Image: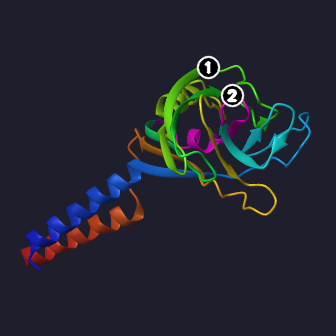
Amino acid sequence: MNLKSTKLALIGLLLSITGFANAGLIEYDLLSISDRYGASSAVYNGDGYIGAYRSSYSGIFCLERETCKTALQVDISDLFALGNITLNSVQLSFELKESSAGTQNITASAFNSQGQLSHHFLAPSAYAQSIFSVTGQTANTLDITNLFTQGFNLGHNWFGLHLNASTEYMWTWTQAGYDRDDAKVRITVDYSVNDIPEPSTLAIFALGILGLASRKFKR
C-alpha cells in the first residue's frame, strides 16, 4: 500500500470513529410488572408496563376500548448523562397477539410517572397527547418522538405513557402461563451527541501511524 492509499484509509477510519462517537442507539425493553387480579391500590416501581381494568390489574398489554388501558414507564436518566444530545427519533413497538384483526386509533398521553405506576385506568395528568393507528394480530411501531422529546426537554428522569383505545379489543396476555415479555414492548431512542468528543485512543494511534508512514515515504 502506498502513502496515498494509507492516508486515505486512515482518514476514513478517523471519520468513522468520529461518526460512531457522535451517534447512538438505545433500546429499552419493557416487561409486564403488574400482578394478575392485583388490587387497584397497588403501586409498581421500575421500567415496565401495567394493564388496568376498571377495578383491578391483570398481566396484560391491552388496548381494549372502554375495558382495559395500558400505562408504561421507563427511566431515561441515562440520556441526560450523555450531555448535549439531539433526539433524532424515538419509536415505541409492541405486538398485539390475542386481538381482533382490525385497525383502530389510540390516544397516547405522555406524563411524568416519577418511577411509579398506579392504577392508571384513566390517563394521568398529561403534558402531551398524540393519536396513532394500530392494527391487531401483528407488530406495531409508533413514532413517539414528539411525546418523548417534550418530557426530555422538561428534564423528567422518567417517561410515562398511557394508551387508550377507541373501537376495538386488542391485547397480549403476559399473566401466569405466559411470558412477561410476550408483548415485546420496546422503546428505541436514536440520538446524536452535539458536543465534539475527545479523540479516542484509537484515533490518536491512527494519527501516529499516519505520521510514521509520511516520514518513511520521505526517506
Residue 127, numbered circle? 1
Residue visible at 91% across and 33% down in the picture: 41
Let me know if residue 47 appears in the view.
Answer: no
Q: Nearer the viewer, residue 132 or 25?
A: 132
Q: Which amino acid lies under the numbered mark 2 shown in the image of this protein? A: Asn
The quarter of the image holding the C terminus is: bottom left
Please, what secondary structure does the residue beneath circle 2 have?
A: loop
SS class, disc 1: loop
Q: Looking at the image, which residue is at 54% across and 46% down? A: 136
x and y percentages locating residue 155 in the rendered image: 61, 28
Q: Is residue 116 visible?
A: yes
Q: How far across and how far down the image is residue 217, in percent?
A: 9, 76
* Residue 132 percent across, percent down from the top left: 50, 31
Looking at the figure, which quarter contains the N terminus? Answer: bottom left
Q: Is residue 68 magenta?
A: yes
The mark that comes first in sequence, 2 or 1, is 2
Residue 45 counted in the magenta span? no
Q: Are marks 2 and 1 in contact (CB under 8 Å)?
A: yes
- The residue singled out by tag 2 in the image is 112
Please give the label number shown on residue 89: none
In front here: 160 or 210?
Answer: 160
| Residue segment shown in magenta | 64-85
- Residue displayed at 79% across by 35% down: 53
Given the image, on which type of amino acid does mark 1 rest? Tyr
Residue 139 in percent (x, y) is at 51, 51
Would you identify the image quadrant in which residue 114 lies?
Answer: top right
